[in-house]
Image (cartoon, grey):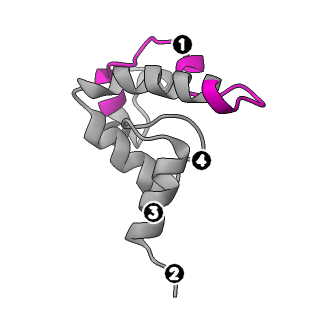
Amino acid sequence: MPLVEQLPGRNADVWDWQLRGACRGVDSSVFFPPDGERGRARAQREQNAKKWCRNCPVMEQCRQHALAVGEPYGIWGGMSESERHAALRYLRPSG
């Protein structure tokens, strides 16, 4: 009988796509900005992060997750924070 600590969480099936991500094992600083990052440095980091996403087998799942939960930071599914914000405004117009 397995120990409770060895059992997957009740949402393991919801998160298992992350195990197949091209970014798995890549330092999170590639995808998430340091405090105060702006301008060219931010644009370059975002472009580099998006390269990991281009051929990722779970890019669409990652993107859908980020949009569904409103991920506020980082590159998810090949989209930056501002791109997700714009997409959500388009998908959920106010008024």
Q: Is residue 60 above or below residue 50?
A: below
Q: Main secondary structure of the magenta part?
A: loop
Residue 71 part of the magenta-drawn span: no
Q: Nearer the viewer, residue 81 or 38?
A: 38
Q: Amino acid at mark 4?
A: Pro
Which mark is nearer the camera, 3 or 1? 3
Label 3: which residue?
88
Q: CA distance from mark 3 to mark 1?
A: 27 Å
* Amino acid on which disc 1 is placed: Asp
Query: Label 2 is placed on what type of residue?
Result: Ser
> How much space separates mark 3 and mark 2, taking CA atoms?
10 Å
Q: Nearer the viewer, residue 67 or 87?
A: 87
Work out whether mark 2 precedes mark 4 in sequence or the reverse, and give the earlier one. Answer: 4
Q: For the residue labelled by badge 3, is the local secondary structure a helix, a strand or a loop? A: helix
Q: Are marks 3 and 2 in contact (CB under 8 Å)?
A: no
Q: Which residue is mark 1?
A: 27
Of residues 11 and 38, which is closer to you in this image?
38
The residue that label 4 is drawn on is: 72
Residue 31 visible? The answer is: no
Whether residue 64 is visible: yes
Residue 27, percent from left and from top: 54, 12
User: Counting other residues with Cα less than 10 Å from the Cα at mark 3, is it few (<14), some (14-19), or many (20 or more)?
Assistant: some
Q: Residue at x 48, y 67 (%)?
A: 89
How far apart marks 1 and 4 lie (CA) works out to: 19 Å
Residue type at mark 3 is Leu
Query: Does dot 2 land on a helix, a strand or a loop?
Result: loop
User: Which secondary structure lies at badge 1?
Assistant: loop
In front: label 2 or label 1? 2
Element marked by disc 4: loop
Q: CA distance from mark 3 to mark 4?
A: 12 Å
User: Can you identify the residue that label 2 sits on?
Assistant: 94
Tell me how far mark 2 sits from mark 4, CA to CA: 19 Å
